[in-house]
Image (tube, grey):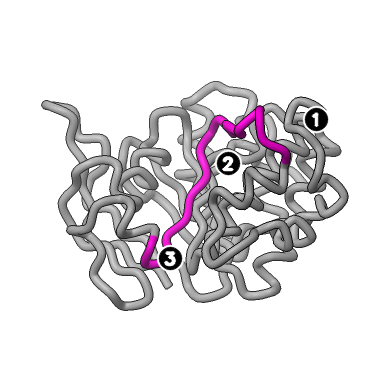
């Protein structure tokens, strides 16, 4: 579904990504993890056409690397952002209609368990519910591949688990997804494969059970010193 080959991004003299190669197969949910500053969001920005890059980007076999962001979206590349910005003066149904392709997109609310909220206003929803509406809005455009940038950020444990279950269900129904997330338990629990970035390079890739035991991955997170380190080490101990 997605084939990224030798992708590099530089900001002035800083090389944010170095010869990154990533693949997402049809109907696959792939996790993209790494310490802060590893280049995860930059990779999605480059794939979706928001930053300049070198290398090859193909979607369903078509070369989209030279296209602007809106044309990549028309080819079926969808994405969410770290901050879920909904139109607060529109109800949920209208928020989805704005993004929908070929008519109303309200029906996709059922895919994320939010069908009851069609007439609700965004201000009346919890953070977790707003995140699910954001995912539904991206799905309303009927993407072949959906890139999710930290959808669980700011969610509590229950909300994160609910989101994870919805994403796994979508993958099981055939939706291809690339998931950036710091919630290690979520990624290891729902993804088919996991790709790990550090300093703009892929340092590990494979099944979750294999990646979480990789010494390079453990060292990368120990070096980061963040809360995610404890999660990774706890997972390893289990």
Q: Give whichever of discs 1 and 3 has the lower sequence position.
A: 3
In the picture, the disc for residue 181 is 2
Q: Nearer the viewer, mark 2 or mark 3?
A: 3
- Seen in the picture, residue 136 relative to 149 is either above or below; the reply is below
Q: Are marks 2 and 3 in contact (CB under 8 Å)?
A: no
Q: CA distance from mark 2 to mark 1?
A: 20 Å
**In percent of the image, x 70 and y 72: which residue is there?**
172
Q: CA distance from mark 1 to mark 3?
A: 29 Å
Q: Are marks 2 and 1 in contact (CB under 8 Å)?
A: no
Q: Residues within 10 Å of mark 2 (few under 14, many from 20)?
A: many
Q: Is residue 236 visible?
A: no
Q: Nearer the viewer, mark 2 or mark 1?
A: 1
The residue labelled by disc 3 is 76
- Would you say 99 lies left or right of 58 here? right
Outermost residue, top side: 225
Q: Which of 138/96 is in front?
A: 96
Hey, which quadrant is residue 37 in on the image?
A: top left
Helix, strand or loop at mark 3: loop
Q: Give whichever of discs 2 and 1 has the lower sequence position.
A: 1
- Seen in the picture, residue 66 relative to 58 is either above or below; the reply is above
Which contiguous range is marked in magenta?
74-91
Position of residue 227 measured from the top left corner of the image (x, y, whole percent): 64, 24
Hey, which quadrant is residue 104 in on the image?
A: bottom right
The residue labelled by disc 1 is 126
In the picture, the disc for residue 188 is none
């Amino acid at each position: 579904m997605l084939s990224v080959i030798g992708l590099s991004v530089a900001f002035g003299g800083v090389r944010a990504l170095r010869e990154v190669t990533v693949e997402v197969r049809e109907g696959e949910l792939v996790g993209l993890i790494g310490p802060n500053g590893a280049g995860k969001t930059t990779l999605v920005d480059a794939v979706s056409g928001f930053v300049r890059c070198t290398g090859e980007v193909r979607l369903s076999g078509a070369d989209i690397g030279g296209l602007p962001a809106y044309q990549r979206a028309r080819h079926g590349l969808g994405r969410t952002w770290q901050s879920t910005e909904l139109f607060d003066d529109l109800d949920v149904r209208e928020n989805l209609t704005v993004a929908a392709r070929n008519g109303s997109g309200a029906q996709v609310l059922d895919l994320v368990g939010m069908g009851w909220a069609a007439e609700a206003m965004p201000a009346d929803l919890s953070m977790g519910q707003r995140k699910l509406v954001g995912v539904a809005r991206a799905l309303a455009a009927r993407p072949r591949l959906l890139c999710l940038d930290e959808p669980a950020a700011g969610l509590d444990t229950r909300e994160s688990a609910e989101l994870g279950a919805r994403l796994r269900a979508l993958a099981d129904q055939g939706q291809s997804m690339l998931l950036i997330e710091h919630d290690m338990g979520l990624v290891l629990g729902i993804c088919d494969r996991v790709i790990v970035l550090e300093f703009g390079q892929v340092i590990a890739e494979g099944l979750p059970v294999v990646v979480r035991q990789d010494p390079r991955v453990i060292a990368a997170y120990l070096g980061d010193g963040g809360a995610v380190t404890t999660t990774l080490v706890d997972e390893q101990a289990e």
